[in-house]
């Protein structure tokens, strides 16, 4: 959904795929029929970005070069669905992109590569998401040939420094005036444009 009227619109990825006559498959759920369709494509590698669900084992086992996730944090920090918002709300000064092999856990797979970036003091979620999106694309293009030729190997994640994302809900935008000004500002940065901040 896009814009004030929240009209359902094709994503930029879908629009580009259709422009280049690439097949687009959007199953509502990964049931046996959907998994068979993916299997029929005989994928060498599956790349996942901002999918928000754990892939079933039947999908994880399809590609010879793994299912790779582009995750917008420096794992194991901020495992979960909203790493950018959580990094900003926590006042983190750096973040980055992690390319990892997917497994049956929530962002717990082996790390293929990572790249760090600094977070601007006044940077908000949309700007940081844009920068991380570009970084993720560049890192994937640079890393895939090395991965396919077995020139790099994935390494298990450390459990030290593990943090989990909180699920962002409308109520998280409520200002608590006993928080510090810095904490309130960081929430504003992380929760822009949605859900935004509010008070009574």
Image (tube, grey):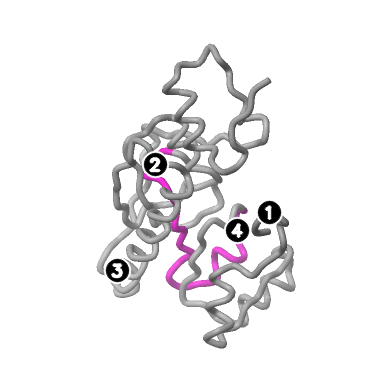
Q: Nearer the viewer, mark 3 or mark 2?
A: 2
Percent of width and height locating residue 58: 62, 65
Q: Which mark is residue 123?
A: 2
Percent of width and height locating residue 135: 35, 59
The alpha-carbon separation of the residues under discs 4 and 3 comes to 25 Å
Task: Please tell me whether mark 2 sits on a helix, a strand or a loop.
Answer: loop
The alpha-carbon separation of the residues under discs 1 and 3 comes to 37 Å
Contact between labelled residues 4 and 2, with CB atoms less than 8 Å apart: no
What is the quadrant of the N terminus in the image? bottom right
Query: Which residue appears at 60% of the width and 83% of the height?
Result: 23
Percent of width and height locating residue 21: 56, 88
Task: Please tell me whether mark 3 sits on a helix, a strand or a loop.
Answer: helix
Give the residues in magenta. Answer: 53-77
Q: Nearer the viewer, mark 2 or mark 4?
A: 2
Q: Nearer the viewer, mark 4 or mark 3?
A: 3
What is the quadrant of the C terminus in the image? top right
Contact between labelled residues 2 and 3, with CB atoms less than 8 Å apart: no
Mark 4 vs mark 3: which is more N-terminal?
4
Q: Nearer the viewer, mark 1 or mark 3?
A: 1
Q: Residues within 10 Å of mark 3 (few under 14, many from 20)?
A: few
Q: Is residue 94 magenta?
A: no
Q: Nearer the viewer, mark 2 or mark 1?
A: 1
Percent of width and height locating residue 149: 29, 74
The alpha-carbon separation of the residues under discs 3 and 2 comes to 26 Å
Q: Is residue 165 above or below residue 155?
A: above
User: Which residue, as the protein is rendered here, is positioned at the far top?
Assistant: 178
Residue 116 vs residue 36, the one in the foreground? 116
Query: Which residue appears at 68% of the width and 54% of the height?
Result: 4
Q: Residues within 10 Å of mark 2 (few under 14, many from 20)?
A: few
The residue labelled by disc 4 is 55
The residue labelled by disc 1 is 4
């Amino acid at each position: 959904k896009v814009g004030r009227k929240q009209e359902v619109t094709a994503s930029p990825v879908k629009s580009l795929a259709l422009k280049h006559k690439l097949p687009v498959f959007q199953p509502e759920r990964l049931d046996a029929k959907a998994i068979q369709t993916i299997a029929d494509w005989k994928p060498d590698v599956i790349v996942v970005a901002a999918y928000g669900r754990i892939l079933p084992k039947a999908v994880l086992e399809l590609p010879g070069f793994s299912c790779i996730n582009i995750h917008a944090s420096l794992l194991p920090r901020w495992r979960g669905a909203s790493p950018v918002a959580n990094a900003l709300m926590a006042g983190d000064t750096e973040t980055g992109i992690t390319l990892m092999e997917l497994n049956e856990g929530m962002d717990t797979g082996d790390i293929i590569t990572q790249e760090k970036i600094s977070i601007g003091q006044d940077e908000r979620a949309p700007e940081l998401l844009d920068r991380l999106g570009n970084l993720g694309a560049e890192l994937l293009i640079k890393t895939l040939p090395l991965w396919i030729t077995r020139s790099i190997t994935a390494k298990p994640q450390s459990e030290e420094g593990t943090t989990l994302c909180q699920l962002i809900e409308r109520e998280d935008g409520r200002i608590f005036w006993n928080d510090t000004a810095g904490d309130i500002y960081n929430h504003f940065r992380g929760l822009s444009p949605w859900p935004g901040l509010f008070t009574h």
